[in-house]
Amino acid sequence: MKSLKELYKIGPGPSSSHTLGPKTACERFLQEYPETDEVEITLYGSLSLTGKGHLTDRICIQTCAPIPCHVHFSSETCDAHPNTMDLFAYHKKKMIGSWRVYSIGGGTIRIEGKEFKESEEVYPQNSFYEICQYCREHQLFLKDYVDEHEKIDDYMRAIMNQMLATIEKGIHTQGILPGRLQLKRVGADLYQKALLEKNPLKKEKMMLMAYAYAASEENASGGMTVTAPTMGASGVMPSLVRYYKADRHFSEEKIIEGLKIAGIIGNLFKTNATISGAQGGCQAEIGVACSMGCAFVAYMEDLSDDLIAYAAEIGIEHFLGLTCDPVGGYVMIPCIERNAVATLRAIDSALLANEVGNLKENKVSLDMIIHTMNYTGKKIAVELKETSLGGLASVVPLE
């Protein structure tokens, strides 16, 4: 498996596959052809169908500036991957190079015929079963597993701080989200309501909802956020991090350990299934984010490694088959609300794993559910995989 640096990335929203991936592609393309004085980009599949709402053209133009960049939306699809883009470099009107790039989710890209250093394997194990075997043989807990393979505490601290900064900005920002939907931001209002709530149980849930809305609204507005595992699902992990730091007063060291464990879970999905909504539906984004969140919460609550895995399995199991049908191609409806739902579910799933896991053996392993999610994603109709051609996207009117 790859480094956790390939899973957790800081960048501009609203979509890791549609903004951060193309941004990375443009940056590397210009590094490869520094003499370029003009760029042509053609988008295919999901990148084309929802590229306007996901600001794909805008991020390409901004990244290439001051070099002129012309973005075209093709009606064609590419069998190799639904998120495909062709880049062409010109110098004095003569083409000097071209790339075909696949934005595979979470801001990660693959360039046809090319490999980069960051694509190197860091973790020899490719399944949770193999990880557990390794940990038993070396007398390790899951929290120590990452440290055995890469030293990334400083990087994870930066990830944690960005998550906190994203929410901090979101809970103090009001207004209307960009785009034709004209959605009002509600994260700040929810936060104020939560501060005034007297019922402690309700207050806790309202805080979590406020954090999720705040982070997701920042993402939807093109603000800086963290892929966890994607930007469309970037409200879950930051909300839980904020909750355990600001409301529960856990140490930064404990939170960073929890982020590492959540990262292992996300990495397993990314390696053995997908975290791309265009490939696997929203189960691959918000479902995986919930699974990561479940593992994080379980660790913060001092559950055993077996129960951490059980919590992660519960988190994704009940998102299986979830479609990706963003209205208007914007990462807003139903995306923002789903982030709040998944945040609350992460708390409940960890509690369920702890209570039920001590009463019976879980028959569904984490590896089984990852395999099932991958299978299910392939069966979801293409209209329901980030194309805005079906589902809510086809019935909710644009204003």
Image: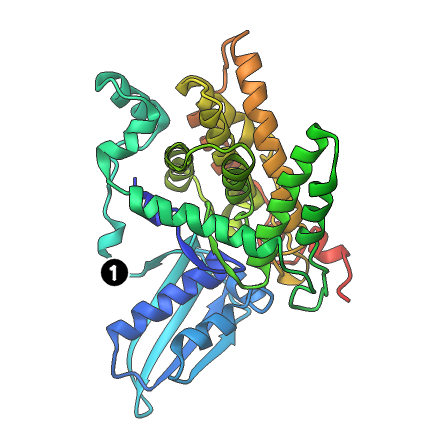
Quadrant housing residue 110: bottom left
Q: Is residue 25 left or right of residue 221?
A: left
Quick one: which residue is furthest to the top in this view? 359
Residue at 30% across / 46% down in the picture?
Answer: 154
Residue 289 at x, y percent in the picture: 51, 40
Residue 212 at x, y percent in the picture: 60, 45
Residue at 54% across / 68% down in the picture?
Answer: 55
Residue at 77% across / 55% down in the picture?
Answer: 395
Residue at 59% across / 55% down in the picture?
Answer: 170
Q: Is residue 96 left or right of residue 102?
A: left
Q: Is residue 5 above or below residue 17?
A: above
Closest to the observer, 120 or 340? 340
Task: Look at mark 1 in the image and give the residue it sits on.
Answer: 114
Closest to the observer, 147 or 99? 147
Q: Is residue 366 above or below residue 71?
A: above
Closest to the observer, 325 or 242? 242
Colouring rule applied to residues: rainbow
Q: Is residue 203 left or right of residue 38?
A: right
Quadrant housing residue 218: bottom right
Which residue type carries mark 1?
Lys
- Location of the N terminus by quadrant is top left
Residue 268 at x, y percent in the picture: 38, 35
